[in-house]
Image: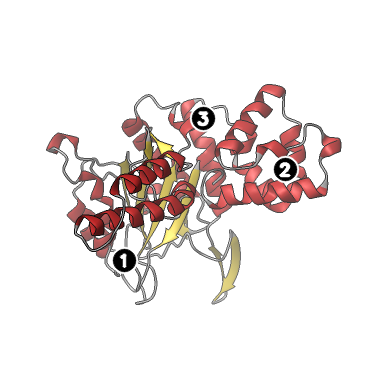
Amino acid sequence: MYITITAQKLGGDYSQSSADFVEYLEKENQGLEQEEIGHFFNHYGNEIKAKEVVREIDGNTAKLKKKEPKFYSITVNPSKYELKKLQNSSEDLKRYTRAIMNDYAASFNREINGKPITVDAIKYFAKIEHQRTFKGTDKQVRENQPYASKILQLKTDIRKTEQGRLDGNIKKMKSEIAKLEAEAPHRQNGRRIVQGMKKAGNQSHVHIIVSRKDASNSVSLSPGSKHKASEVRMHGKIVKRGFDRDAFFTKAESTFDKTFGYKRNYAESYRSKKDFIKNPNLYFTTLLGLPASEKALAFKILAKSGVPMASIPTNQVQLALKTIRYLKRGVDIAIKSGSIGI
């Protein structure tokens, strides 16, 4: 599971209105028949129109300053192993989204009218998408790029030759293109992977847009707060503040496991990410101490994430500092790319 919480971008890709972001989330509906279109939903409603989402989010910004985010974006990206546990991607992910928004509300160390925050105080809308495309930053695209550049140059030379602007052997150039296509390291369904190509397999994931203000438009609720759950004295009163991201991620993972009966491997757990960041020695010691079947699956998960498995030691005696540092680079890249962890 990979979950991110991102503030609305101001002065960047998105304006201060949620319209551009909502339009971006509608991209998958382009060209679909009416019955195939994916709709927004919230905690109690389904088939909510995009214009209603924009109206509700944009109209819930009382007293927010010009440079303060008006909304936050939460993305929920189940792994391929987790997706296999779902009977129906759309309905199961909708159920899961509603469940973790309860977890989201409970992670605020705030009160409204003397009562803890519940999901009814959260104004949010979610949308499930089933497709992903390869981006320029993806490993497959980056490593294929030298081949793509040479192929593009050859195709350009062929056009110039056909137009009489360049002397060249077209047959030879076409042969070179075929050779480069075959040598490119990353392919999908027999084709060289390029930026913009749709990723194969189940790519279901969830986008959630959450208003910065509560449903009454009177209290600011920021999951981006620098303050964790704590209390502070303000104007002579003790005031609760903060959002506990650690608690939210932990609860979201636990909610998935309980909801779908998922047996989570250590290598894909939130606990393992924390161990890896805070104590790499503990991370690898725990990894190697797993039962044989669980360890085999853990290595498989890590290998799929791009970690150099050939150098993972087979026993704890071999777990030298040099090896840990080497593997740490691989796991670190996997975590940053969103392949593992939350």
Left or right: 33 in relation to 202: left
Q: Mark 1 = which residue?
A: 14
Residue drawn at 37 percent across, 64 percent down: 8
Residue 134 in the image: state x and y as whole percent: 38, 47
Disc marking residue 211: none
**Which is more toward the observer, 150 or 4?**
150
Could you tell me if residue 116 is visible in this image? no
Mark 2 or mark 3: name the one nearer the start of the chain: 3
Residue furthest right in the image = 317
- Helix, strand or loop at label 3? It is helix
Mark 1 or mark 2: name the one nearer the start of the chain: 1
For residue 131, which quarter of the picture?
top left
Eye-nearest disc, 2 or 3: 2
Tell me the kind of residue under disc 2. Tyr
Q: CA distance from mark 1 to mark 2?
A: 39 Å
Residue drawn at 68 percent across, 52 percent down: 277
Tell me the kind of residue under disc 3. Lys
Residue drawn at 51 percent across, 30 percent down: 258
Tell me the kind of residue under disc 1. Tyr
Label 1 crowding class (10 Å Cα cut-off): few <14, some 14-19, many 20+? some
- Helix, strand or loop at label 1? It is loop
Is 3 situated above or below 236? above
**Which is more toward the observer, 98 or 299?**
299
Could you tell me if residue 15 is visible in this image? yes
Is 160 situated above or below 233? above
Mark 3 or mark 1: name the one nearer the start of the chain: 1
Q: Mark 3 = which residue?
A: 258
Residue 326 in the image: state x and y as whole percent: 72, 49
**Tag 2 and tag 3, C-beta contact below 8 Å:** no
